[in-house]
Image (cartoon, rainbow, N blue to C red):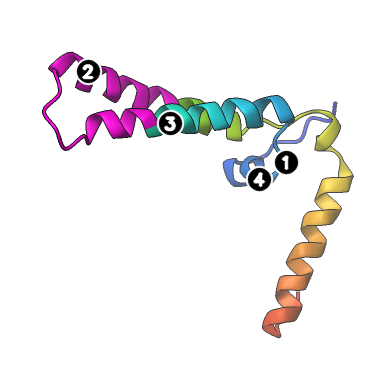
């Protein structure tokens, strides 16, 4: 595998492997459930609200970390060419030269 250093923005823009997309979606679901428990309009016991806070925190961390995963197969030049073409299209649509 090539040793390319990617910053955070480049890692997020690269395609996410299938397994980490599943984990990311699971994290989003946990965050949603935690958010519902924390922001419930009815009075809930303190333990339920605390569990909701932990679900919200855990789901957010799981989603953020799994989004930055990049697989070795998708790490090649094919994706970089796709991104370069998309930035060229954006420049041509806005009337600016790259």
Disc 1 designates what residue?
15
Q: Earlier in the sequence, mark 2 or mark 1?
A: 1
| The furthest residue to the bottom | 95
Of mark 2 and mark 4, the one earlier in the sequence is 4
Quadrant, the C terminus: bottom right
Which residue, given by chain and number where applicable, does mark 4 sit on? Answer: 10
State how far apart marks 3 and 1 are (Cα): 19 Å
Q: Position of residue 47 (x, y in %)?
A: 19, 14
Query: Which span is picked out in magenta?
Result: 33-59
What residue is drawn where x is 23% and y is 30%? Answer: 38
**Residues tagged 3 and 1 counted as in contact (Cβ below 8 A):** no
The residue under the point 14% across, 18% down is: 46
Q: Is residue 75 magenta?
A: no
Give the vertical position of 16 relative to 62 (above or below). Answer: below
Q: Nearer the viewer, residue 8 or 73?
A: 73
Q: Is residue 21 visible?
A: yes
Badge 4 marks a residue whose secondary structure is: helix
Q: Earlier in the sequence, mark 3 or mark 1?
A: 1
* Depth order, front residue of 6/74: 74
**Which residue matches tag 2?**
48
Q: Give the CA distance from mark 3 to mark 4.
A: 20 Å
Other-residue count near label 3 (Cα within 10 Å), few / some / many at <14 / 14–19 / ≥20: some
What is the secondary structure assignment of the residue under circle 1?
loop
Residue 62 location (% of width, % of height):
50, 25
Task: Find the distance from the CA under tag 2 to the CA under tag 4.
Answer: 38 Å
Residue 52 location, quadrant: top left
Whether residue 97 is visible here, answered yes or no, is no
Which residue in the protein does label 3 denote?
Answer: 60
């Amino acid at each position: 595998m090539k040793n390319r250093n990617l910053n955070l923005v480049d890692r997020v823009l690269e395609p996410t492997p299938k397994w980490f997309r599943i984990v990311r979606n699971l994290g989003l679901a946990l965050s949603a459930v935690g958010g519902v428990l924390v922001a419930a309009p009815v009075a809930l016991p303190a333990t339920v609200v605390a569990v909701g806070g932990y679900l919200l925190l855990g789901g957010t961390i799981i989603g953020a970390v799994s989004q930055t995963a990049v697989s070795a197969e998708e790490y090649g030049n094919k994706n970089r060419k796709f991104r370069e073409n998309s930035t060229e299209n954006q420049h041509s649509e806005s009337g600016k030269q790259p």
